[in-house]
Image: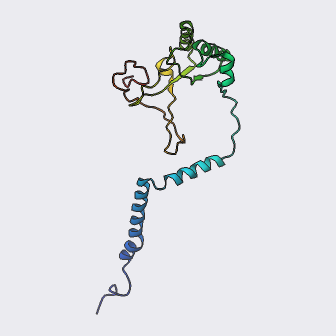
Amino acid sequence: MGSSNSNPGKPRPLRRFFGNVMLPSVALGIAVIVIRQLGILESFELGAYDRFIRWRPSEGIDDRFLVVGVDETDIQTLDEYPLHDDTIADLLAELQSYNPRVIALDIARDVPQGDEAGRDRLRETVAGSDRIITVCLLSSERSPGAAPAPGTPNDRVGFADFHQDPSGVVRRTILASIPPPPPANWPRLHFCNNAQQ
């Protein structure tokens, strides 16, 4: 007399579980990992992400921010390109008169523009305010980067480097970074190309 569990026509529950659940799950998991590592679906994912961002309802204009731009009309009116340090100092002084919480200067000022008196005024204006933040460009193996405006304390320097995805779109930004060393024998070290700072 045989046992009641030895029915040859009926698969065992454990074998059925491994055959119907575990094996397909493991195979599917490995396939997803391989596809993800190869980046096959990345363009589809980013395209869907971009579409969802465009479909969001408009949040309207945030009136807490003021963006002051420089265009060709300004350059022709002032008859200077790039803008002189004295002109930037005048602009910063005018903006400070409105008592803003912060002023971010996103114009490179690593090379003096105009006369030395204008450079000194810019240095004094930036150093004399705790609300002005200036930017620099981080160094790379091929580029020495660009220093922040003169007079900017290290704790008020941001960087204007934007990481582009392979498709050439900026979808993210860097919050903190240590600059790689600049090209060999580069004599001018500054905050954004000196990894020691």
In this picture, is 100 found above or below 33?
above
Residue that sits furthest to the bottom in the current view: 1
Image quadrant in which the N terminus is located: bottom left
Residue 136 appears in the figure: yes
Q: Position of residue 156 (x, y in %)?
A: 51, 21
Colour setting: rainbow
In this rendering, does residue 68 appear at all? no
Horizontal relation, residue 109 to residue 69: left or right:
left
Q: Residue furthest left?
A: 1
- Which quadrant holds residue 12? bottom left
Residue 130: x %, y % from top left: 56, 16
Left or right: where does residue 22 sit relative to residue 157? left
Q: Position of residue 92 (x, y in %)?
A: 62, 16
> Residue visible at 52% across and 29% down?
160
Which quadrant of the view contains residue 97? top right
Quarter of the rendering occupied by the C terminus: top left
Front residue (pair 7, 191): 191
